């Protein structure tokens, strides 16, 4: 699976970020605590990821730590 993604924050949305990783934009859903002024557009970030696959959706979730 995808263990982590490192890249530049391209866009900040209500519940997710778009991370530019070598020209590919990954939409990663993040907890609200990450979006409370901790991350700004243009920041370099490393997010550990969890890929959620269900019958109706696929979502990539990101966190600062593996925990």
Image (cartoon, grey):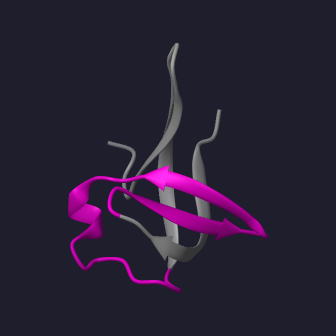
Residue 32 drawn above or below residue 55: below
Count of all numbered marks drawn on residues in the image: 0
Q: Residue furthest right?
A: 23
x, y percent for residue 54: 50, 17
Please state the horizontal and vertical placement of residue 52, each as a whole percent of the image. Answer: 49, 28
45 left or right, relative to 39:
right
Q: Nearer the viewer, residue 8 or 27?
A: 27
List the single residue furthest toward the top. 55
User: Which range of residues does the magenta coloring cover?
Assistant: 14-43
Tell me which corner region of the image, top left, top right, bottom left or bottom right, holds residue 32. bottom left
Above or below, 50 relative to 64 = above
Q: Is residue 51 above or below residue 20?
A: above
Q: Is residue 57 left or right of residue 39?
A: right
Q: Quadrant of the N terminus?
A: top right
- Residue 39, given in percent of the width and then of the height, sits at 36, 77
| The one of 4 and 31 positioned closer to us in this rendering | 31
| 23 falls in the magenta region | yes
**Residue drawn at (48%, 57%) of the image:** 47
Left or right of 33 in this view: 27: right
Q: Residue at x 38, y 58 (%)?
A: 64
Residue in view at x 57 percent, y 51 percent? 4
Determine if the magenta segment contains residue 57.
Answer: no
Which residue is depicted at the point 28% across and 77% down?
Answer: 38
Q: What is the x, y in percent for residue 22?
A: 78, 69
Hey, which quadrant is residue 40 in on the image? bottom left
Is 11 positioned to the left or the right of 15 in the image? Answer: right
Quarter of the image with the C terminus in it: top left
């Amino acid at each position: 699976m995808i263990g982590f993604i490192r890249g530049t924050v391209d866009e900040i949305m209500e519940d997710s970020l778009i991370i530019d990783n070598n020209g590919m934009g990954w939409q990663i859903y993040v907890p609200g605590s990450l979006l409370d002024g901790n991350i700004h557009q243009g920041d370099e970030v490393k997010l550990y990821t969890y890929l959620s696959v269900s019958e109706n959706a696929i979502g990539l979730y990101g966190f600062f730590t593996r925990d």
